[in-house]
Amino acid sequence: MSTFPLPVTCERKMAARGKKRAAERAAENKTKRAKLNGNKTPQTEKNPKTVTFTPENEEEANKNIISVPPPVSSGKWTNKERVLVFSSRGISFRTRHLMMDLRTMMPHSKADTKMDRKDKLFVVNEVCEIKNCNKCIFFEAKKKQDLYMWISNVPHGPSAKFLVQNVHTLAELKMTGNCLKGSRPLLSFDPKFDQEPHYALLKELFTQTFSTPRYHPKSQPFVDHVLTFTIADHRIWFRNYQIIEEDASLVEIGPRFVLNLIKIFQGSFGGPTLFENPHFQSPNTHRRLIRQATAARHKERQLVKQILKEKRSEEQEVLAKDVTDEVFQTPAEPRDPEVQLQPPEPHKKKTLRLTELKKRTLMKRKGLR
C-alpha cells in the first residue's frame, strides 16, 4: 500500500492532543505524591523507641557486637623507605629465585617488570620515581652467566656495583632455620666496615636498604632473624640466620651470596667514580687466564713429546773399550769332548707298551675281552 502524507491541520491537531495527555498525566502523579506524603509522618514527629537495658539484654547486645582487635604495633609509620627489586632480561632461574627471596625477606620492597637490555641504566631512576621508591636493587645479567647487582639511593646517589658470586637460594639450601614473614631483621656488620671510608659508605647504604622501617604496614613487630655482612678475601659475604628463643643460638635460613665490589659512584646508576676496587678481576679476564693455563699445559706436553722423539732419533755414541771390563772374567778349565763310538740302545719298553695297547684295542673290538 502506498502511504500519502497527512494534511498540516491533522498533524497540528494530533500534536495538541499529545501535549494535553502529558499534562493530565503529570497532574495525576502530583496528586498521588501529595496523598502519599499526607499519610506519612516526618522523622522529627516520630516517637523514639525506648529500650530498657536489663542484664539479659546487655549480654545479647554484647554477643551481636563484632569486636575488632587492636593493632599489634600502634605507632606511626614515619620512615617511608621503599625498595624497588627487579632485574634486566636474560637472568637465569637461580637469579630469579634469589630476587624472589629478597622480596619475601623485605616487606617494604616493590616489584616491577624486567627491563629491556637496550635501555640505559638512567631509565631505572624514572622507574623508581613512577613506583614512588627511594632505594633500588637492580640485577643486571650479562652473557647469561655473569650477574651484577646495583644498590642505589634514588635519585641523588650514591650507588654501588657488585659482581654476585656463589648464589644459593632458599629452595636450594633447604636449611632448618625459619622466621616469620615480614618480621624486622637485625643487621650485623663486620668491624672492618668502620675501618675504611668506602666500607662505611656501603654500611650506611645496606642499613637503609635492607632494614625494614618501624611500624611499616606490611611488617610484623618481631625480631627473629639476623642479616650478617662479613668482609673476607676483599669480598662481602651475605648470610641470613634465625634467632632461636631458648638459647639465642643462630640457625641459617638462606639465601646466601657473595658480593665482589667493583665501583662506587657518586650519582644514582652513574656519575663520577668515588672508589674503584683494585683487587677486582672481571669474569672475562678470569676465564681468559683459565684458558691460557690449559693451553700452556697442552703446549708443555707437546714439547716433552718432541724432545723425547729427538732423543730417540739421535745415533748412540760408541764408547771406547774399557780395560776394567775384563777384570772379573776368569777362564774355565779345558775339558776333552766325549765321543760315543757305539750307537745307543733302542728303548724296548716303549715299543712293548705300544704293542700291548694295540692288542687290547683289537680284543675289545672283537668282543673277546
Image: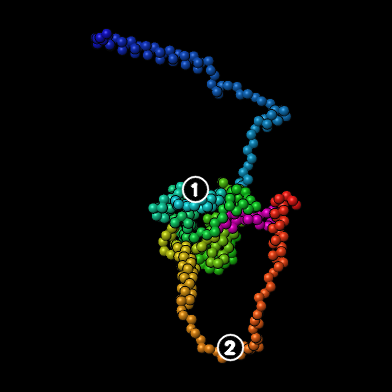
Residue 286 counted in the magenta span: no
How far apart are the alpha carbons under marks 2 and 1?
92 Å
> From this viewpoint, is residue 79 visible?
no
Task: Say if mark 2 contacts mark 1, CB within 8 Å.
Answer: no
Is residue 137 shown above or below 339?
above
Q: Position of residue 20 (x, y in %)?
A: 35, 11
* Residue at disc 1, secondary structure: strand
Q: How busy is the neighbourhood of tag 1: few (under 14 within 10 Å), some, or many (20 plus)? A: some
Question: Which residue position holds label 2?
Answer: 325
> From this viewpoint, is residue 30 visible?
yes
User: Which quarter of the rendering shows the N terminus?
Assistant: top left
Is residue 339 shown above or below 243?
below
Q: Which amino acid lies under the numbered mark 1 shown in the image of this protein?
A: Ala
Q: Is residue 342 left or right of residue 8?
A: right
Q: Is residue 56 left or right of residue 259?
A: right
Count of numbered marks: 2
Q: Position of residue 17 (x, y in %)?
A: 33, 10
In this picture, which residue range is highlighted in magenta? 239-257
* Residue at disc 2, secondary structure: helix
Residue drawn at (55%, 55%), measured in percent from left and top? Answer: 210
